[in-house]
Amino acid sequence: MAVVSLENNIKIYSSELSHALLKVSNYKLDERIAQTVAEIYARNLDYSDPELMHVGVTSVAKNLITKIKQEYFKETY
C-alpha cells in the first residue's frame, strides 16, 4: 500500500512542480524539460520530512529554474 501512496505523491508533486516551473519561466521553458525536471525532483524528494513538505512548489521552481540550462528555454521571436 505504501508504494501506491508514494507513486501517487510523486505524480501529484511532479505535476504541480511542472506547472510551477512553466509559470516561473513565463512559459519559456520547454514543457518536456519542465516535466522531466519535475519528475526527477519528485522522485528524489523525502516525503516523510515535514520541513521539506512545507516548502511550496513555486519556491522550489524558482530555485530549480536557475539551474536549468538556457538551451532548454524556447526561443521567442
Image (cartoon, rainbow, N blue to C red):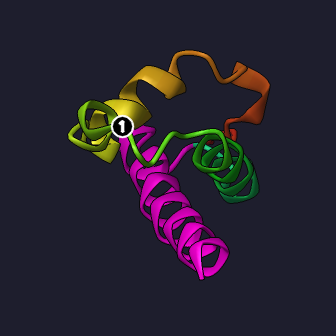
Residue 7 position within the rendered picture, expressed as x and y whole percent measured from the top left: 63, 71
Q: Is 50 in front, or is 36?
A: 50
**Residue positioned most to the front:** 1
Where the C terminus falls, by quadrant? top right
Viewer-closest of 73 and 56: 56
Q: Which residue is mark 1?
A: 49
Residue at x 62%, y 40% (from the top left corner): 41
Quadrant position of residue 25: top left
Residue 72 relative to residue 8: left or right = right
What's the amino acid at mark 1? Asp
Q: Quadrant of residue 29?
A: top right
The local secondary structure at tag 1 comes to: loop
Q: Residues within 10 Å of mark 1 (few under 14, many from 20)?
A: few
If the image is split into quadrants, where does the N terminus sit? Answer: bottom right
Residue 70: in magenta span? no
71 lies above or below 30: above
Q: Residue at x 38, y 50 (%)?
A: 23
**In the rendered structure, which segment of residues is drawn in magenta?**
1-28
Horizontal and vertical percent position of residue 45: 54, 40
- Answer left or right for 32 relative to 14: right
Residue 61 on image: x %, y %: 42, 36
Q: Residue at x 46, y 60 (%)?
A: 13
- Secondary structure character of the magenta stretch overall: helix
Looking at the image, is 66 positioned above or below residue 1? above
Whether the magenta-drawn stretch holds residue 18 is answered as yes
Count up the numbered dots. 1
Q: Residue at x 67, y 53 (%)?
A: 39
